[in-house]
Amino acid sequence: MATEQQSGEAVSDSRRTGPYASAVNWMETLSETQFAYLLLAPALILLGVIAVYPLVQTFSMSLFADQLTGSARLGEFVGLQNYIDLFTGARDFALPSAFLPTFTTQFPFVTDIYSSALMVTLIFTLFSVLFETLIGFGQALILDQDFRGRRWVRVAIIIPWAVPIVIQGMIFFLMFQPNIGFLIGTSDNPALLNQLGLIGTTPLRDTADALFLIIVADVWKTSAFMALLILAGMQSIDRSLYDVAKVAGASRWQQFKLITFPLILPTVLVAMLFRTIDAMRVYGIIETMAGCQTVPSLSCLVVTTFNAPLYGTSATVAFVTAGIIAVVVSVYIVNFASEGI
Amino acid sequence: MSSETSGVGVGADDAEMKRGPLGRWVDKAIKNPDRVYRAMFYVATVFFLVTTLFPFYWLLVLALTPNRLITNMGLLPKGFQPEVFITMFERVPFHLFMFNSFVLGISTTVIVLLIASLAGYVFGRLRFPGKSILMLGILAISYFPPAAFLIPLFELFTGNTALSIGAVTISSPDLFNTPAPMVLPFSALFLPLSIFILTTFYGQIPDGLEDAARVEGTTRLGALFRVIVPLSAPGVATAGVLTFIAVYNEFFFSFLMNNGEASSWAPIVAGILKYQGQFDTPFNLMAAASIVGVLPVAVLVIIAQERIVSGLTAGALKE
């Protein structure tokens, strides 16, 4: 701001007048750092108002009790009591589903995992990311080949990624309705998947079955995303490495094991990180396919308590969810750092 | 079994073999492993094509079958009722929901491209203290779950947040059931990806071009919008396409930040869910609406697949 007076010297625009010209002239006099922050201002303001402020606000709301009656949204200040109640299970009576599973002394040390929001989210994350990586890898290996019609195969593989979540949910809702298709029948008239004993006849009303189908739906939609990222990693590999390997007599499997795999591993890990973060926020597909009562994920718990309205509890769960994601992210980053990538 | 001489590129010792076609194939495969790889490749390709495309075919089967006949369906439609694509608009004004989705998508895309162009220019072309910390900060924000923003944003947009400056208290305007409570969170949510894509593209433009424009007397912003942005048109298109698709696909804020009516700017999320009637479940209409809802993005993917692939790659490999 102090340099405002020195304008005129360099720019021919100084002949122009009016607020626009003077703003432009003023901008020319800024140092590179000042100019950088000026251009970043819109982005920082938007992220500040829509992301940083709500995050801080969520944390501060989580320090207050719920207010069930009256016009106020929050009760008295209770410090970390909401967090203590959440982790000791003392708050579970007010929640549509428990936060933690019940711990026991016998193997496997936990029971009721399907009624615990945390366990449901972790199971969903673990299996969906695992299968998306494997299938995405397979799809990437195919798209890496040169063949006729490759463009259309690529379109077919990408399209599920572009399907809106609500339509993805509707598709799988329609595929797994009892008795309308050949996949799910009724108890008198079991169909393919029932006969195989994979899932029951009302799978979208049973937590374990619904969770399984939601993972299938997520893998269907998101494997393409993994495939594209892994494919990009594969195509950035120097092709002459393969020529050298061929001359040296390496088999295809050896080429894959010794060249492709180690070189794309960093890409795969980055892609897995993105998917893990995304999977831990799962909400839309659950809401459309099975409903939050059947499959309570962490985001589901935030929304149901918010609608209750238990603002203090909801803010606490929301902040814990963000915290768990932050922990997962740092685990990945520490692993990256230790592998020297 | 008499085709011993028809082996393609196989040694002469093959001639003595007398086996079935499978045996011969296996034998050739052992001598020439490439055949196995090719067979595996075709099997896998067909498998992936069937698994990705079958759900769309299933939608078509359900849409074309009259609703009362939808039970114990096989692989073919029972009957042929293309009128369903008209009935679905009579039951729910789905075109209005789609219009809302387009408006939300396009306005978010414009906002994101403008803001991300400025930020991408800064990160891609300028050197200043605090650059890497700011980039990490913007990345970190995109890690947080939308659920962590929900309550304060809901309060803000329903006019329940008050800001006190001295004696004056300004409460936030009630914007619920306008596009703002969706467009603003979408913009913040999808801004980081566009910033990273544009940073990559803007950073690749040679400095000489910008310097030349500056010597000619163009202002800094003029150089950005008249030289750098046009030269990075593919990057801008990529960021735009990805932002639009992301908004069109979004569920969380689309579902929670409106009352679910087309007149309140609710997007297709509400439209699709509206088919679930209180007294009946019109499976055929649900399937038809899903097909219509997918069409715009399917067309976009077919047209812009190169852009999408390069954009996702650039955005994700940035870190």
Image: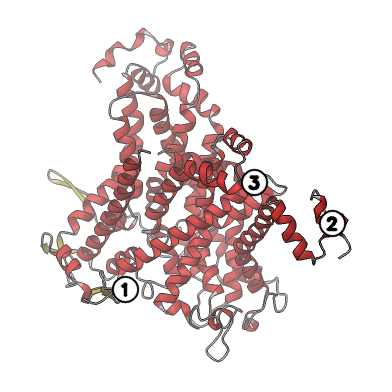
Check disc 1 and give the amino acid type.
Answer: Ile
Quadrant position of residue A71: bottom left
Mark 2–mark 3 Cα distance, whole angstroms, equals 33 Å
Check disc 2 and give the amino acid type.
Answer: Ala
Q: Which residue is mark 3?
A: A145
Q: Residue furthest top?
A: A9
Q: Residue B71 at x, y = what percent? A: 61, 83
Quadrant showing the N terminus of chain B: bottom right
Q: Give the mark count.
A: 3
- By what rule are the colours in the image chosen? secondary structure
Q: Is residue A41 left or right of residue B65?
A: left
Q: Is residue A221 left or right of residue B122?
A: right
Q: Residue B91 at x, y = what percent? A: 57, 72
Q: Is residue A18 above or below residue A110?
A: above
Q: Tag 1's secondary structure?
A: helix
Q: Are marks 1 and 2 in contact (CB under 8 Å)?
A: no
Q: Is residue B269 above or below residue A103?
A: above
Chain to which the residue tagged by mark 2 belongs: B
Q: Which residue is mark 1?
A: A113
Q: Is residue A182 left or right of residue B192?
A: right
Check disc 3 and give the amino acid type.
Answer: Gln
Mark 1: few/some/many CA within 10 Å (<14, 14-19, 20+): some
Residue at left 55%, top 73%?
A174
Q: Residue A200 at x, y = what percent? A: 48, 82
Residues behind callouts 2 and 3 on a single chain: no
Residues behind callouts 1 and 3 on a single chain: yes
Mark 1–mark 2 Cα distance, whole angstroms, equals 63 Å
- In the image, which disc is placed on residue B15? 2
Given residues A152 and B177, the one toward you in this image is A152
Q: Residue A148 at x, y = what percent? A: 73, 47
Residues behind callouts 1 and 2 on a single chain: no
